Image (spheres, rainbow, N blue to C red):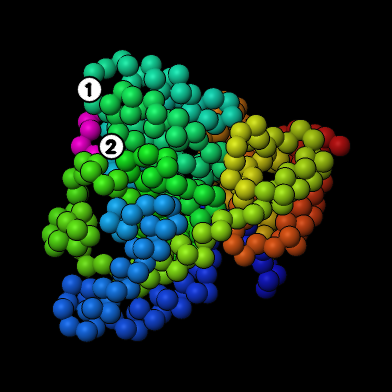
Amino acid sequence: MPDAFTYLDHNATSPLRPAAFDAVVEALRAGGNPSSVHRVGRTARARVDSARRQVAALIGARPSEVVFTSGGTEANNSALAGAGRRRMLVSAVEHDSVLKAATGMEILSVQGNGIVDLGVLEKSLAASDEPALVSVMFANNETGVLQPIADVVRVAHAAGALVHCDAVQGAGKVSVDFSGLGVDYLSLSAHKFGGPAGIGALVVRGGAPFVPDRLGGGQESNRRAGTENVAGIAGFGIAATEARSGLATTEWRDHLEAALLEIAPTAQVYGAGADRLPNTTCISMPGVRAETQVMALDLAGICVSAGAACSSGKVTRSAVLLAMGVEPAEAETALRISFGWNTCFDDIERLIAAWRDLYTRVGYSDIGHAQAA
Ligand code: PLP
């Protein structure tokens, strides 16, 4: 493996921004508990308050609506439990931290382009009088497909449902407007845009019902007990400020996809017909399993993911692609490439060269076909 490497897996974890790193170190060095009344405690409290304003500013929320959590998973779990609605309707392409957060959910199918079907949502909501919670993500972690959240909110609120939006992959990449969207709950995670891992937030609209699932001290205005992770929160705040301009990488993404499709004209770009994040490409390499691609590209010094990166590191077939109607054998060949705040154009050119090299060597041979070209 070469010493220098190209990192194109920002949807898994984006490298820590230097300013966020400095903020974490400074907060760790200073120490203190934000609940203490002495000067060290007050300084820690000031760091938390400042970061709360920074995170709120990233997504157009009020600071009082931001509840710090241990990350996106906790935010999603807390939203689903805390809304207090037994009936839950969630899209088929949600992250596992939504899909596995409760049992008995109703799954909303998506169209071939990965977008939730508003007609299906409307019909499903009308099928019962029981008040519901609807959970639809802002942007998909595998395909980057953006959901029509404002429309979801309109349909759901008209039926008396509350709305949760997992914006973990959207925030810091494209504009996310909490109050403009009108959602009741929104999840964030710092490590997806250059903050530290292990810190995130659930944004709870003022006035929305919320029953905390962590009980103990009165931290986070009684919405999430436990001494605050001041260092993580400080890094989150700085990363949120730096990420406010989002990612201007649409042209690079389009250049990458055009180049890969020229190399392998039968490759598929998933969600190509939909609005997508500017940093994400999910593409099949015809005939080559994703594991093979990830390992070969790693040997060439390029870090990318196969579909969803599971916590166990095991590659499983992508439930997102299957929900979009992709054939299982084809889904096994899907690679996820994701840019971030420190990606440069050369990274993309290196990936294209390595992808070409691999496809020319093993395209169509990995799962028993003859080489196409
Ligand atoms: N939601 C989405 C869409 C994600 O992509 C992820 C992480 O991959 C999560 C939630 C979980 O976030 P965290 O890693 O902060 O728990």
Q: Quadrant of residue 348?
A: bottom right
In this rendering, position of residue 15 left or right of residue 237: right
Q: Does residue 249 lie above or below 162 as drawn?
A: below
Q: In the rendered image, which quarter contains the C terminus?
A: top right
Q: Amino acid at mark 2?
A: Ala
Q: Nearer the viewer, residue 252 or 351?
A: 252
Residue labelled with disc 2: 102
In this rendering, position of residue 127 left or right of residue 282: left
Residue at 51% x, 65% y is 242
Magenta segment, which residues?
83-88
Label 2 crowd bin: few (<14), some (14–19), many (20+), radius 10 Å: few
Residue at 29% x, 53% y is 65
Q: Which mark is residue 353?
A: none
Q: Does residue 110 lie above or below 71 as drawn?
A: above
Residue 356 visible in rendering: yes
Picture coordinates of residue 131 (x, y %)? 24, 26
Q: Quadrant of residue 54?
A: bottom left
Q: Name the secondary structure under disc 2.
A: loop
Label 1 crowd bin: few (<14), some (14–19), many (20+), radius 10 Å: some
Q: Amino acid at mark 1?
A: Glu
Q: Nearer the viewer, residue 155 or 302?
A: 155
Q: Nearer the viewer, residue 62 or 259?
A: 62
Q: Which mark is residue 130?
A: 1
Residue 71 visible in rendering: no
